[in-house]
Image: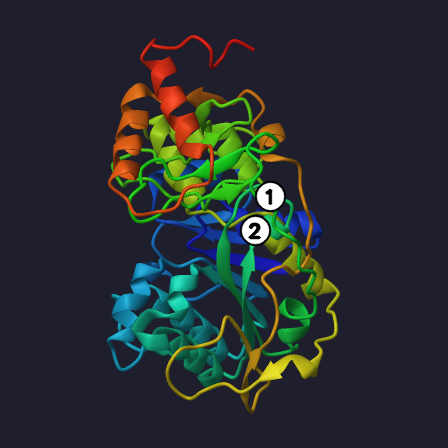
Amino acid sequence: MKVGSLFTGIGGFEVGLSQASQDFQTMLVCDNLATSQAVLRHHFPNSALEADVTKLNCLPADIELVTAGFPCQDLSQAGRTAGLAGNRSVLVGEVFRLLEARKAAGKPVPWVLIENVPFMLSLGGGGAMRLIMSEFERLGYRWAYRVVDSFSFGLAQRRERVYLVASMIGDPADVLLADDNPVPRPTTDLARYGHGFYWTEGRSGLGWAVDCIPTLKNGSTIGIASPPAVLLPDGRLVKPGIRTAERLQGFTDDWTKPAESVAKPSLRWALIGNAVSVPVPKWVGGRLLNPGNYNKARDLPFADSGRVPRAARFDGNMRFGVDISTDPLGVRGPQLTEVMGDDFTLLSERATAGFLSRTQRATLKFQPGFIDAVIEHLAFMRGESGDLLAA
């Protein structure tokens, strides 16, 4: 199955698909960021590289699967329009333009796989997602989508994303909705697990994550990295390193290193934060080659307006909501501390003090012992305590 990738990023879709089977061959990658292009040139030297999706007239005739992780904020604009056709300022519209061009040429693309943040389901009160559904249906595709969590694929990261599969030749429900294996999330145990949280917050939220980190963010456009913090079982507050971030997305160490040839190293955080978690397309790819059997007993009504469900399908005639978890595989991976190893730095005095100050103005409830650990870490960073790292 030959793959054409739009909004490729650093190739998460393509790496995952190739891990599922060497039968997936990436023929085309497309991204407008110089940092992404540097990574793609290094890892996909035999794939055609395009920089501007708007300048692609048509996809190659042999492409059988299109992947796309288009910008979420793009949908905000799409939801305010009457439709996508002709609106070239809406990048997701480029996906449908290229699919329509292939169909008009008599060679429709059989399969499409897209990914985005769960926020896409609530944009415009569900209007943006319905817009995407309608476009696929207009072009003759059946579709299925589902919110899945990267944690259930063995990654120590809590990361929910919407994956949608559309097809003209198969049933996408047999790909995305045939597997359901909920995995229990661990409960707080400060003496046993590392606990991830957003040190840049502390007033309205924390992103508290047990034995994993909260969702990796993409950092700022000017290269200010925003890794989460981790409270280690020994009481240290640390920030994971860039290699850990790559591991937490399923990439090999230094996958994004080529980006440093065109930009400062901190911009690698944005690439990783925007990436697709590799094990998810690996699972999808396996199901594309070997479909499961969707159980129609999971079907629920699909409302014509208002909020859309977190999983749904279209069988060619009707839309259905689907009762299913975010855990297709239910794999529990290594503990966060094992994944990190020694790839971390201590959270600085300034960062710790700022975080602690915000928590003192918050009305949040914190886990017993957490704030005490923050205070002790701050004292150590100020040189007021030598006990924290004595072990």
Please state if 50 lies on the left or on the right of 171 as rendered: left
Where residue 347 sits, quadrant-wise, is top left
Task: Give the mark, 1 or 2, whose residue is nearer the N terminus.
Answer: 2
Helix, strand or loop at label 1? It is loop
Question: What residue is rendered at 56% in x and 28% in y?
Answer: 340
Q: Is residue 345 left or right of residue 12?
A: left
User: Which of the 4 image quarters holds residue 101?
Assistant: bottom left
Give the amino acid at mark 1.
Leu
Q: Amino acid at mark 2?
A: Ser
Q: Secondary structure at mark 2?
A: helix
Task: Count residues near mark 2 (Cα–Cα under 10 Å), then give few for <14, some for 14-19, many for 20+.
Answer: many
Task: Decide which of 335, 84 is in the foreground and name it.
Answer: 335
Closer-to-camera residue (164/339): 339
Circle 1/circle 2 CB separation < 8 Å: yes
- Would residue 262 be seen by someone viewing this image from the given angle? no
In this view, the residue in front, 250 or 61, is: 250
**x, y (%) of residue 104?**
46, 80
Query: Do we see residue 66 in this rendering?
Result: yes
Q: Identify residue for label 2.
A: 150
Q: x, y (%) of residue 48?
A: 49, 49
**Quadrant containing the C terminus in the rendered view:** top right
Return the residue found at the far front.
Answer: 368
Disc number for residue 155: 1
At label 1, counting other C-alpha atoms closer than 10 Å, the crowd grade (few under 14, some 14-19, many 20 or more) is many
